[in-house]
Image (cartoon, rainbow, N blue to C red):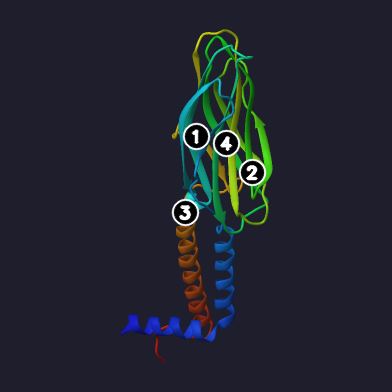
Amino acid sequence: MPAIDHLVGVKSFLNHNSLPARIALMVLAVAALAQAVTFNPPTPSIDTHDGNCTFGGSLAGAATNGGAGVTLSGNGSMQGFGLNGGVCRITLNWPGTGSGAFPGATATVTSIFTLNVPADVSVSTCLLTVFINGIQETQINCPTGSGGAFGLAPQSFPVPASLNSYLVQLDIVAQWSDTVHTVFSVSVPGPTSIDILAQAGLPSGPAPPTLVLTLTGILLLSLVGFGILRRQSAGGFPGSHP
């Protein structure tokens, strides 16, 4: 049957044209390598630094973009007053592990979160820090003073060749001016969050496995088309008979 003849022709092409097949496999290998980095979900925690304050909150996180990124969310709070200087510090930690090669020399970090600051509280320190493989790669100053919403456009930072671990920290120091017990809080909602992406400009479309399968289909179709053209140049078509 013609359909069987076409399959025979494709099989014959793949068997007798090892160079194009090898090139196709190399291209697929490069595509897979470019998407090979994988972030695992974090195991977050909240560090407190002062026994004079009451702390609360909970954190969460998930791998995104087929493992090529991670999104971090949660909230933290400090209840303090102006005793012994009235200074409290809270650190939101999102540590995690990962594996694979980064697809480029940079990654990006974006964030949108809100500081809710009472009238008797001032924020003296607010830092967002990213560590990759235990090395601090970037540190960003977020709002101090009256607080409010903070949004950071995608910002590039350097990454090593491969990923073993990561840590994102949001560190805040606040000071109370009187002895009234008020609550400072920070909110990192899931819909906005703090996001890490493996490479600046990496598309947020198909997850890496889907992308590789798509490339596979395109390459196989290209190989079949190349085989048909070769048969045409030789005076025939796959499945045709003299």
Q: If you read the primary sequence from the N terminus, does the residue marked by circle 1 or circle 3 appear first?
A: 1
Q: Residue 186 location in percent, x, y?
A: 51, 25
Classify 111 as above or below 135: above
Whole-number angstrom distance, CA of label 1 to CA of label 3:
20 Å
User: Hey, what amino acid is under mark 4?
Assistant: Thr
Mark 1, residues whose alpha carbon is within 10 Å: few (<14), some, or many (≥20)?
many
Q: Residue 222 location in percent, x, y?
A: 50, 70
Whole-number angstrom distance, CA of label 3 to CA of label 2:
24 Å
- Residue at numbered disc 4: 110
User: Hey, what amino acid is under mark 2?
Assistant: Phe
Does 99 sit left or right of 189 as displayed? right
Q: Quadrant of residue 101?
A: bottom right
Q: Residue at x 30, y 85 (%)?
A: 1
Mark number, residue 131: 2
| Whether label 2 touches label 4, CB < 8 Å | no
Q: Residue at x 55, y 67 (%)?
A: 28
Q: Describe the element under mark 2 as helix, strand or loop.
A: strand
User: Hey, what amino acid is under mark 1?
Assistant: Ser
User: Hey, what amino acid is under mark 3?
Assistant: Ala
Whole-number angstrom distance, CA of label 4 to CA of label 3:
20 Å
Q: Residue 23 location in percent, x, y?
A: 59, 74
Q: If you read the primary sequence from the N terminus, does the residue marked by circle 2 or circle 4 appear first?
A: 4
- Quadrant where the C terminus sits is bottom left
- Residue at numbered disc 3: 207
Q: Residue furthest bottom?
A: 242
